[in-house]
Amino acid sequence: MKTIKVCGVGSVLLGDDAVGPYAARWIASNYEFGTGVEVEDLGTPGLDLIAYMTGMNVLILIDSVDNHEPAGTVTVYDKAAITRHRPAVRLDPHSPCITESIFVAELAGDGPEEVYLIGVTGEEFEVGSPLSEPVQNAIPLLMEKVLEIVVQHGGSFRKREVPLDADIWWENARVGVAV
Amino acid sequence: MAKRITIDPISRIEGHLRVDVEVENGSVSNSWASCTMWRGIETILQGRDPREAWVFTQRFCGVCTTVHAMASVRSVEDALKLEIPLNAQYIRNLILINHGLHDHIVHFYHLSALDYVDILKIPAADPAKTSALIEGLTNWPGNSKKTFLDAQNKVKAVAASGQLGIFTNGYWGHPAMKLSPEVNLLAFAHYIQALEYQRKSVQAVAILGSKSPHIQNLTVGGVSNAINLDSLATLNMDRLFMVKKLMDEVKPFIDQVYLPDVCAIAGMYADWFNYGSGVTNYLASPDLPLDSKNSKFDLVGGYIMDGNLSSVHKFDGFRDKVFVDAVTEETKHAYYKGEAPLHPWKGETDPELTDWQAEGKYSWVKAPRFNGRPMQVGPLAQILVGYAAGDPLTRKHTDKALDLISTVAGHKIGIEKLQSTMGRHVARAIRASMLAELGEKHWELLVNNIASGDVATHNEPVFPSGEIEGVGVHEAPRGLLSHWSVIKGGKIANYQAVVPSTWNASPRDAKGQHGPYEASLLHNPIADPTRPLEAIRTIHSFDPCMACACHTFDPEGKPVATVKVL
């Protein structure tokens, strides 16, 4: 049986960059998956992404992308497309490093065989903003793509009769504690 | 005539470290460190429940998650004068220790080692000779001829495929690369093994914190782990032994691989003890509290001024008055309005963007100062403060490392030499070996305390209607982190995070004093301005973190860093 990991990546504090974590939580709240499939909100792991991808057969990343498409466009990139460009000199361990993490994991002989990036073109990256409307509207299509890839690699899923709370806590209203 | 070099990581949403140096006669004559993105993240917290602030601050940065969570709960607990149950202190300490080990291993092997290790010399190595180099020195099972042969074959395969992957843009063949093919192979084999061990530390954090990268178990007042040694659903003996097993596996890697590798490379590059001292004022926080009141600690905090190791001032606790009164942030050279130094509790975040101006404003990082002086923070500050204060644990681990370095270098390297680019790497490895030992201790403290019948993990916070102020400090992997909160009527009224990289990446202040990155670059040699490996070595030695970086993936593959020579 293949192990499949679905990872939402991005900063929940920076507008549309939250689309990865948002989608991961939304998928986990709406669907149950068979054994071998994990769904996680990984935040912005930087080089630490290596620790979460090793030992997986298939890695499905959800992230905001900049590809000059209209906001909310969903684009699927495969491993060849993701790794087409080589990373350059790195000053810190925190910058985006999906490509670099894949190379390092592969070098150790422990990298995923297949990697997909479900990219959503973002629009608004202001601190504290919720998802923009076009990105919010792209969630169902994005989720469809994820489920399609999961099934294609032998994973199974079932829609929950009653969805769980997706817990998008960063969009909650500002309420203090009673004094 | 000086030549200006800009090392500028390009990302779609700019949020990274940029370094500019002027090079004259093969050496750095002037320097600027800047962050290219606004850190206004604190504003998200205004009006929120102080008990939830840590959930947000944990998302400041995806690599330093636990440290911002910890500093945040400590800040609110300090404002409330809340005591923390012993079990909660030990569980938090074990999370900090394991997170720190993971962070230091990744920093050395996966961010910095290739500044000194030339991958392209590896195919020429003789694996048998590599194995013979260290035979009898350690019991590490991963030092066999076969292991080295396998590692060499990986490099050969990558080289033969014509796809150098992550190594495409390394500074291979640079005149500042000095290791023999055999030593390069040794370090590279450990680079691969390090991947496995850093993951074990992540697993230990995940067991204790219920999840990683974002731990779930903190509360203002303690932790939410229920302790019942017989229940499957709680922190029980099985889980505690899983943590112990992972720590028992990581400790030999630290003792027999990481620390010896750093010492060996340091000894072979001993000239790097002569560069990069920069700001020699050091500031560290006490950490790993041993009691509920936060009055006893396993890591010593305090400060040292002007590199004078014979005079150290120790801090008594997290909220030492000397520390709390001394901290200000200045914005003369940062993209904010106003110029007067402000205390973090009065901090303002009012942006005023200009161009990058060598003599004016050039960074989004504010300039934190301690009694008006720039300070260096990080493992080096912690080790020097502990050593100068006579802390036996710090002295034991430091002396052991210095002996090994001196043996490899063939001449004595004393404690004062650690005030350098190489010293920061050595101090980080010393800190890791201390943490690995302290991990055993705090695991036993936790288990013994539970065995004595104490299962308390949380004290309930009660918020007053008036205004209170708190500071939460934490000696994080990158150094002293402080979260300053003002709470009014049960809501957050102001929140400022003074992060380690703010101290180290600080721009000049109103008096023109350089920040630590800037000062450390001065007088670094630069053999080839188009490939400024030496400047990158010094910057990497700090373990830089521009925490707020946006994570958007760019399929066009713009380079992570470009070097522009003007």
Image (cartoon, rainbow, N blue to C red):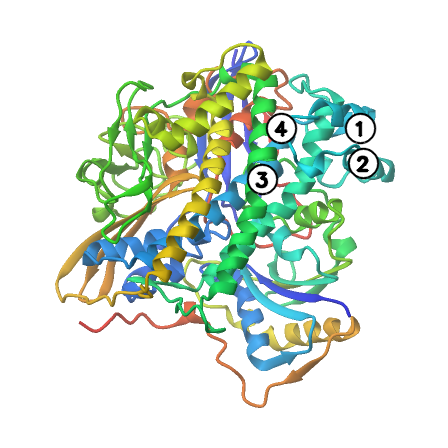
Label 4 element class: helix
Q: Position of residue B1 (x, y in %)?
A: 52, 11
Q: Position of residue A66 (x, y in %)?
A: 62, 56
Rounded to the nearest angstrom, the CA distance separating label 4 from label 2 is 26 Å
Q: Earlier in the sequence, mark 2 or mark 1?
A: 1
The verdict on a common chain for dots 3 and 1 is: yes
Residue B12 in view here: no
Q: Residues within 10 Å of mark 3 (few under 14, many from 20)?
A: some
Label 3 element class: helix
Q: Are marks 2 and 1 in contact (CB under 8 Å)?
A: yes
Q: Earlier in the sequence, mark 3 or mark 1?
A: 1
Q: Residues within 10 Å of mark 4 (few under 14, many from 20)?
A: many
Q: Which mark is residue B115?
A: 4
Q: Is residue B60 left or right of residue A88?
A: left
The residue identified by callout 1 is B127
The amino acid beneath tag 3 is Pro
Q: Position of residue B93 (x, y in %)?
A: 39, 50
Q: Earlier in the sequence, mark 1 or mark 4?
A: 4
The residue identified by callout 3 is B252
The amino acid beneath tag 1 is Pro
Q: Is residue B13 above or below residue B115?
A: below
